Image: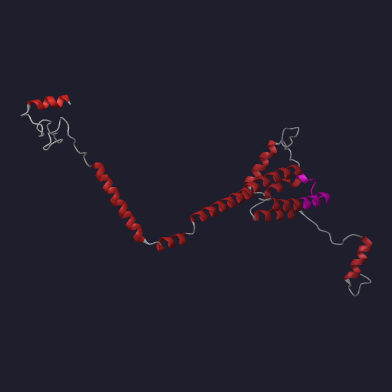
Amino acid sequence: MEGYDDRDWKTLRKSMLDVWGGSPLKIRYTIQDLYDLIKLCQDKGGIKDMKDFRIYQSKFMMITKYLVRNKHIPAKTSVLHLFFLAFPREYQVSINRELVKRDLIPTGKDGYNKPPILEDVMEVAEDKVRARSINAFEAGSNFAAANKEMQKNLDLKKGDGKKREKMLEEYPKEPVQSQIESMAKAIEALASKLNAPAKAEYSRGNEAPSGRLYEPRPCSYCHREVAREFPGTLQDLSDL
């Protein structure tokens, strides 16, 4: 260009801005940019949490609006089918079922389904991702934390395994063994007493004792022991 023999880019850039205004560099997108974005998400396993969803939604809408504005596509519904591809298969099925459940899929006059509104699809997808991310991460982390705390309390109650083994090794075994033997002897003696037969007492069914059952009283007449030789003795005894 004439007047720029020194190839001064700063001067040329300033002149271009003065003539045409705005930035001389403009970001341009094509349909391929959407496919590249989707493939990037698929390589990571698909959209599964809200952080990835927000990034994907923002970039997808930015590219789509550019394509519509520059008439690369007639409307946003033209790339609606591409939006689902960034999600795992089970997420896609869940989103589609929720669209049907909420009656967000319009029907044409001929009875065939028409593409839903892109914003409705994004809203349903956001709800599904949020619900699944809460179940998978928040509830799971809470359970893991609670389980870890419970295990910690149990370990404190039981004590350290090495300490318990050391205490058992240091505790003298002789007194314990002596106490066990003494208790065994006492139990054996008690069992012998319980199993021994009871002593028989004198009764009419048993044999008469060999010795005297009582000491005889002296006679009041002769001061001797009561005997059958004195007939009056029995009478005297009955009169007492």
Name which residue lies at 64% across and 49% down. Answer: 138
* Rendered location of residue 116, percent (x, y): 74, 40
Q: Is residue 70 magenta?
A: yes
Name which residue lies at 71% across and 56% down. Answer: 36
Most extreme residue toward the front is 221
* Rendered location of residue 103, percent (x, y): 71, 35
Q: Is residue 7 above or below residue 37?
A: below
Image quarter where the N terminus lies is: bottom right
Q: Is residue 202 above or below residue 186?
A: above
* Rendered location of residue 101, percent (x, y): 68, 36
Q: Nearer the viewer, residue 157 or 146?
A: 157
Direction from residue 69 to residue 160 in the image, left or right: left
Image quarter where the C terminus lies is: top left
Direction from residue 207 to residue 81 in the image, left or right: right
Q: Nearer the viewer, residue 101 or 130?
A: 130
Report the span colored magenta.
61-77
Q: Nearer the viewer, residue 65 or 139?
A: 139
* Rendered location of residue 184, percent (x, y): 30, 51
Q: Is residue 144 above or below residue 226?
A: below
Residue 198 picture quarter? top left
Most extreme residue toward the bottom is 6
Name which residue lies at 68% across and 56% down. Answer: 40
Q: Main secondary structure of the magenta part?
A: helix
Q: Is residue 160 magenta?
A: no
